[in-house]
Image (tube, rainbow, N blue to C red):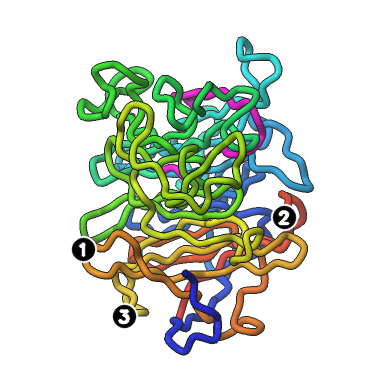
């Protein structure tokens, strides 16, 4: 479905270097306090506030609270950052990181995911109070991979948390329930959660969550997801929630997530049938329409085959709906990308997707031409995206596959 780089209709962009010296930047968020400050979260556990002329200052160091990372490759670490909508008044912000396995968890599992609240220092707005941590949610993870990632506050004021299926492959094996974690609403893995951090202790459950009255974990907002590494709300329009969900063998996908939605994993990969016991056999067969409980399965709005199946890329990186002013023609377009064809030859890609009418099930997309990149590409590994309060989009990249070195950079998409 992706257009080639030579497509004359492909949008043209440039990448302006904003800051460098990161290891593996995974989130960029503007504080909602009118200061215009941009904060960058690095997988290694450091959150930095960007200053003028590309300088950065350490805002929070979580390295001593996290599990030790593998420098060659790891999917654990600091994975998400979100400021409370009333941060200007209350100084509260939230992080998602991987900690050592908690006491009482299955001893052969890998780690425990933490959602924690912190507060900004009372004496320095560019420093967090590291001792203010309040852990509000712990989720045990059987494997090191498929952890989900970027957290976000919705327009409803609730905190949304994407969690992967527990890792390994095919949603089977150690720590995976029969039929897969993603399809089982009695566990939090393979879901997007929604919680109220302003009510209850340590949090409250929104009344209209699908299982607020029982029959499933009350925190669940949507399910049937493999590894929703990046979620983001549209700043405009209908404020829809977009999620990039990395595929297993062939298909990468982007979903518009709705309350109570089941996105098919591990019965589907993309919009195609999937058999976890023989994962390459059902790709050409019609996908199931419902699961074993007769719940409808929602198709992605975007899908593409990855390089292992003769397509492009290796792992979708969810992005943002563009609402800036630099590219008027892109208003309402979804900017996302792919990590790389492989790690040895960094070939991260930036895509621009457009909806063909409100009723269109699938969006069309093209690869953007990076005018100041070699052969029209960014020529590095795409780690994530960010967006500022003006709706402009940023690209987070690194040359190294693992969280090592200091090759991480932040770029702004400009004309």
Q: Quadrant of the C terminus?
A: bottom left
Q: Determine the residue positioned at 55% across, 61% down.
A: 305
Q: Position of residue 235 (x, y in %)?
A: 29, 58
Of marks 3 and 1, the one in the foreground: 1
- In this picture, is 255 found above or below 191? below
Residue 412 located left or right of residue 210:
right
Q: Determine the residue positioned at 39% across, 62% down.
A: 388
- Mark 1 sits on what residue? 358
Q: Which residues are magenta?
A: 132-151
Mark 3 or mark 1, which has the lower sequence index? 3
Judging from the image, what secondary structure is the residue with disc 1 in? Answer: loop
Tell me the crowding category of disc 1: few under 14, some 14 to 19, or many 20 or more residues within 10 angstroms, Cα based. few
- In this picture, is 309 found above or below 162? below
* Residue 42 drawn in magenta: no
- In this picture, is 398 found above or below 188? below
Tell me the distance, in whole angstroms, between the alpha carbons under discs 3 and 2.
Answer: 34 Å
Tell me the crowding category of disc 2: few under 14, some 14 to 19, or many 20 or more residues within 10 angstroms, Cα based. many
């Amino acid at each position: 479905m992706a257009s080639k780089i030579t497509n004359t209709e492909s949008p043209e962009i440039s990448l302006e270097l904003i800051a460098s010296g990161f290891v593996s930047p995974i989130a960029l968020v503007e504080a909602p306090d009118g200061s215009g400050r941009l904060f960058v979260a690095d997988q290694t556990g450091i959150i930095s506030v960007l200053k003028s002329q590309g300088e950065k200052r350490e805002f929070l160091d979580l390295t001593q609270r996290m599990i030790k990372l593998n420098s060659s490759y790891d999917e654990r670490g600091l994975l998400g950052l979100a400021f409370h909508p009333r941060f200007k008044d209350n100084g509260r912000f939230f992080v998602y990181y991987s900690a050592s396995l908690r006491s009482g968890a299955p001893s052969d599992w890998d780690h425990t995911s933490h959602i924690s609240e912190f507060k900004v220092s009372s004496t320095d707005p560019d420093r967090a109070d590291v001792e203010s941590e309040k852990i509000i949610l712990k989720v045990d993870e059987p494997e090191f991979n498929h952890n989900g990632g970027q957290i976000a506050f919705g327009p409803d004021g609730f905190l949304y948390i994407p969690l992967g299926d527990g890792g390994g492959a095919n949603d089977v094996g150690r720590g995976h329930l029969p039929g897969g974690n993603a399809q089982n609403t009695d566990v939090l893995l393979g879901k997007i959660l929604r919680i109220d951090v302003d009510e209850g202790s340590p949090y409250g459950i929104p009344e209209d969550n699908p299982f607020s009255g029982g029959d499933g974990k009350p925190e669940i907002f949507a399910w049937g997801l493999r590894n929703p590494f990046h979620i983001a709300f549209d700043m405009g329009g209908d404020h829809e929630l977009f999620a990039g969900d990395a595929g297993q063998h062939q298909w990468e996908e982007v979903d518009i997530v709705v309350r109570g939605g089941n996105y098919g994993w591990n019965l589907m990969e993309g919009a195609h049938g999937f058999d976890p016991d023989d994962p390459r056999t059902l790709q050409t067969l019609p996908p199931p329409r419902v699961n074993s409980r007769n719940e409808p399965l929602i198709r992605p709005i975007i899908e593409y085959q990855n390089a292992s199946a003769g397509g492009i890329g290796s792992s979708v990186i969810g992005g943002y709906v563009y609402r800036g002013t630099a590219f008027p023609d892109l208003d309402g377009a979804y900017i996302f990308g792919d990590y790389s064809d492989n790690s040895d030859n960094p070939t991260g890609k930036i895509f621009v997707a457009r909806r063909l009418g409100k009723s269109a099930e699938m969006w069309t997309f093209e690869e953007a031409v990076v005018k100041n990149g070699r052969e029209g590409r960014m020529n590095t590994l795409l780690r994530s995206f960010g967006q500022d309060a003006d709706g402009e989009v940023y690209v987070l990249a690194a040359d190294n596959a693992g969280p090592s070195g200091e090759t991480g950079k932040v770029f702004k998409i400009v004309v």
